[in-house]
Amino acid sequence: MSISPTATAAAAAAAAAGASSTPTSTAAMMTDKKAAVCVTGANGFIGTYLVKTLIESGYTTIHCSIFPNSSSSHLFSLFPSASIRIFEADILDYDAVSRAVEGCHGVFHVASPCTLEDPRDPQAELVDPAVKGTQNVLEASKNHGVRRVVLTSSISAMVPNFAWPTSLPVDESCWTDINYCRSHQKWYPVSKTLAEKTAWEFSQKHGLDVVGINPGTCLGPLLQPGLNASCAVLQQLLQGSKYTQECHWLGAVHVKDVARAQVLLFETPAVSGRYLCTNGIYQFADFAAIVSQLFPEYPIHRFTEETQPGLVACRDAAKRLIDLGLIFTPLEEAIHETVVSLKAKGFLEEQRPKS
């Protein structure tokens, strides 16, 4: 597919400014919890928490779109009495996506590949599913009369950006430097940035109501059976990794806060544009120091220099969400719950406290 640079730049600028490309729906439309909603990537880390939050918020019918042949058993064991419908859909398959979206008045697009290993074919494994998958979800949403799509993007669509003023904290107007990422083989930021820009271009062109959320590194107890990439960041740090997360870090957030924010953005009629979702901006070195204080028995590397040179700290970086009433879980609590879960699921060995 081709993306018009001019149209994309205009759409992205409008998104960063919080401009709406379509009249806002009424509150009654957004909070009709008896109407079905669709969650793509519903069996993943964020997706499972989103399904949980929707159920707890009173939504009665949820279309859970999952990758074909991937496990969804944990959804039924976690929510045995909920009205969950499973749709196996490769997001590159428009017809499958359309079946999942049909009959829904809201769509939460979460599905996007993120691997723990370097991809052999970045275009096929990361970029195409992210970009073309997003276009398929939006096309199906438009064709089935969906009232709003909440797009789960990432801070990876915001950084790295070395042209960003060193005196300012990163905000929603910041976009990842795709050329830098391509030249340095950083394909996940490329995939997330192109996917989000595709969404804003589609929204501007077709008048589809799209709202974006850009989470930081998500932490929290694992409800799904496998280890996800964001919790692996903490796991590897506890195991002695010296990797600085260089361009892939702004801050961390409890995954339950991301899910709450997604529902909040769906239910609030007047929202528009991008919403950064992180419990503050700070150096990965600062994060590592906090983890070390909480779990001194683990061989956590002590970073002595800035891990993100020039990154400006900001306590209320997610001000747009805070102004909507979102209260963030303390970082220490998110770290502790994640570590307990990693141990319980066998992803982290128990260490005896040092005497």
Image (cartoon, rainbow, N blue to C red):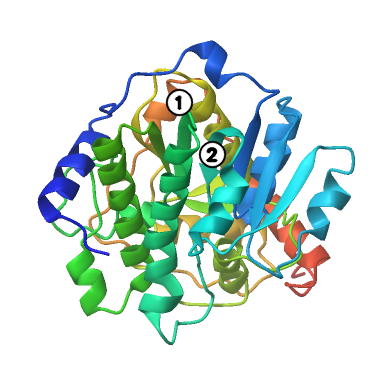
Q: How many marks?
A: 2
Residue 75 pos. (x, y %): 79, 51
- Circle 2: residue type: Val
Secondary structure type for disc 1? helix
Classify residue 117 as left or right of residue 165.
right
> Which residue occupies 42% across, 20% down?
323
Name the residue nearer the viewer: 181 or 269: 269
Classify residue 236 as left or right of residue 63.
left
From what the image shows, is residue 309 above or below residue 337?
A: below
> Which residue occupies 40% across, 35% down?
211
From what the image shows, is residue 98 above or below residue 302?
A: above
**The C terminus sits in image quarter:** bottom right
Residue 98 pos. (x, y %): 54, 49
Q: Which residue is mark 1?
A: 322
**The N terminus sits in image quarter:** bottom left
Secondary structure type for disc 2? strand
Within 10 Å of disc 1 (Cα), the crowding (few <14, some 14-19, many 20+) is some
Q: Which residue is mark 2?
A: 107
